[in-house]
Image: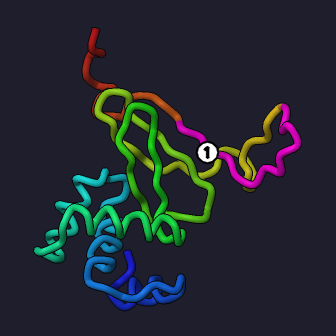
Amino acid sequence: MPDPAGLERALRAVGLRVTRPRLAVLDAVHAHPHLDTDALITAARTRLDAISHQAVYDVLRVLTDTGLVRRIQPQGSAARYEARVGDNHHHLVCRDCGAIVDVDCTVGAAPCLTPSDDAGFVVDEAEVVFWGRCPACATRPSAP
């Protein structure tokens, strides 16, 4: 996880002004990958008391637009955010508790998978979500 100076450098590197709300949200995303917006609001407020819901939403949009943060949204889940960007990794998602874990590329270099018919697209990335039960949920009986 980057230190405050590293977060400031990251913001400046993509042409953003360094503000307290941006630092608080970016730090929260680095500290707690795969949280939804509500949880990130709580996490950001531990760093900056007076940050509004709207400010967090606005910062997340800017951070996502500039590529500092990645937004993922597994089916049936609220949007989640992570600071691991630019490496074409994938995710494991627990069907029971919703836990999300990063998993490196399945085979070879990006894009990990080649479509059977690319329909003329120039493919540069693949997004894969693996579904199952996390270790904690797998030890409990399945819900009917």
**SS at badge 1:** loop
Q: Which residues are magenta?
A: 117-129
Residue 6 as seen in the image, left or right of residue 124:
left
Question: Residue at the spot x=45%, y=89% of the render?
Answer: 9
What residue is rendered at 26% in x and 60% in y? 40
Give residue 79's position: percent from left, percent from top: 39, 47
Instruction: Tell me the crowding category of disc 1: few under 14, some 14 to 19, or many 20 or more residues within 10 angstroms, Cα based.
Output: few
Q: Could you say where residue 78 lies in the image, as x and y percent from the top left?
A: 35, 42
Question: Which residue is located at x 45 percent, y 43 percent?
Answer: 73
Q: Is residue 57 magenta?
A: no
**Residue beneath label 1, please?**
127
Say which residue appears at 28% left-offset and 66% top-offset.
56
Q: Which residue is outermost to the top?
A: 144
The relative height of residue 76 versus residue 4 in the rendered view (above or below) is: above
Q: Is residue 121 left or right of residue 61?
A: right
User: Label 1 amino acid?
Assistant: Glu
Query: Is 121 included in the stretch rendered in magenta?
Result: yes
Question: Which quarter of the image is occupied by the C terminus?
Answer: top left
Residue 74 location, quadrant: top left
Left or right: where does residue 47 sit relative to residue 7?
A: left
Residue occupying the far left of the picture: 49
Along the viewing direction, whichever of 16 and 7 lies nearer the viewer: 16
Q: Where 84 sits versus 23, above or below? A: above
For the stretch drawn in magenta, what is the main secondary structure? Answer: loop
Q: Nearer the viewer, residue 58 or 75?
A: 58
